[in-house]
């Protein structure tokens, strides 16, 4: 085999780049919601990571089914959860198809609080005495620190988000910090900035231009991104208030915005 065919890669796909209501928003006739630019169609925020060893989903949004169909996802090895807000968990039941295709339970990872909420809302998936064929069936792993999965080291990044703590994730390989994904945060505390400094790609909450009590706005996200100094940074979890083109035009060099279907590729050791 040539060295090319054995090249080991991480491919990251932005499944969704939108805020909790999605864009277009139901009943809205603003120019962004009526836009024909596919990058202005923002499903709820989520990413997918594929290495030769594992396929990992971050969050199960209410748009999961359509995101999976759009990207041709046919296998999952693990699901990581950032926090238990509806826009990040309400596609949970669509994991049933991935359990079926795996022929067994699907490992899920999250904070103790997130997993407790998932077990409360989707109680039928967590009943070991009653496993119904064709239903979703998961195995919970509480995240307490850096863990290994699919050739990646995954470091949790706890960040404040109103009354809950969101887990961002730093994905590294052989000590190289490849990607930090931090959705839904009101601020980026200094210890988290230190952990992600040196990362190649940063994807961070950048909801809208106006301030918001539980999300970074564009100015806050830009400040954090410039302080961290990733090779490239991208704002995500966006509202309908600006189009992809207009929001991008207002950002400093090296900072952009995510869009549904955007992909990043990294060489692995
Ligand atoms: Zn959210
Ligand atoms: Zn709109
Ligand atoms: Zn949230």
Image: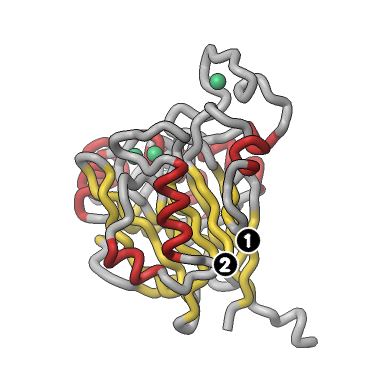
Q: Quadrant of the N terminus?
A: bottom right
Q: Which secondary structure, mark 2?
A: loop
* Residue at 45% across, 82% down: 175
Q: Which secondary structure, mark 1?
A: strand
Quarter of image, res 24:
top right
Task: Examine the rendering and report whether any part of residue 105 can be seen.
Answer: no
Q: Is residue 180 left or right of residue 251?
A: left
Q: Is residue 216 left or right of residue 55?
A: left
Point out residue 206 in the picture as x, y percentages from the top left corner: 46, 43
Q: Is residue 68 above or below residue 33?
A: below
* Residue at 46% across, 42% down: 218
Q: Quadrant of the C terminus?
A: bottom right
Most extreme residue toward the right is 2
Packing grade of label 1 (10 A; few <14, some 14-19, many >=20) is few
Instruction: Judge by depth and name the residue closer to the eye, 46 or 248.
Output: 248
Quarter of image, res 35:
top right
Residue at the spot of label 2:
231
* Residue at 35% across, 40% down: 215
Point out residue 146 in the picture as x, y percentages from the top left corner: 32, 72
Q: Nearer the viewer, mark 1 or mark 2?
A: 2
Residue at the spot of label 1:
264
Packing grade of label 2 (10 A; few <14, some 14-19, many >=20) is few
**Ligand 2 quarter of the rendering:** top right
Point out residue 211 in the picture as x, y percentages from the top left corner: 37, 34
Cα–Cα span, label 1 and label 2: 13 Å
């Amino acid at each position: 085999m040539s060295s090319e065919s054995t090249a080991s890669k991480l491919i990251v796909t932005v499944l969704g780049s939108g805020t909790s209501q999605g864009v277009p928003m139901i009943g809205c006739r603003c120019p962004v919601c009526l836009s024909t630019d596919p990058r202005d169609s923002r499903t709820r925020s989520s990413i997918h990571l594929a290495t030769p060893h594992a396929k990992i989903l971050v969050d199960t949004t209410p748009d999961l089914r359509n995101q999976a169909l759009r990207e041709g996802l046919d296998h999952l090895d693990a699901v990581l959860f950032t926090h238990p807000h509806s826009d990040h968990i309400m596609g949970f039941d669509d994991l049933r198809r991935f359990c079926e295709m795996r022929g067994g339970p699907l490992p899920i990872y999250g904070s103790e609080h997130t997993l407790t909420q998932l077990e409360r809302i989707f109680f039928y998936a967590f009943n070991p005495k009653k496993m119904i064929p064709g239903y979703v069936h998961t195995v919970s792993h509480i995240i307490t620190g850096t863990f290994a999965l699919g050739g990646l080291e995954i470091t949790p990044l706890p960040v404040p988000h109103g009354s809950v703590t969101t887990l961002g994730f730093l994905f590294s390989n052989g000590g190289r910090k490849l990607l930090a994904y931090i959705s839904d945060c009101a601020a980026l505390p200094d210890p988290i900035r230190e952990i992600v400094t040196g990362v190649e790609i940063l994807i961070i909450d950048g909801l809208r231009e106006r301030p918001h009590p539980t999300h970074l706005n564009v100015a806050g996200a830009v400040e954090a991104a410039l302080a961290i100094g990733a090779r490239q940074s991208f704002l995500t979890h966006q509202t309908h208030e600006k189009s992809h083109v207009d929001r991008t035009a207002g950002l400093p060099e090296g900072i952009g915005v995510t869009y549904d279907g955007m992909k990043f590729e990294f060489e692995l050791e």
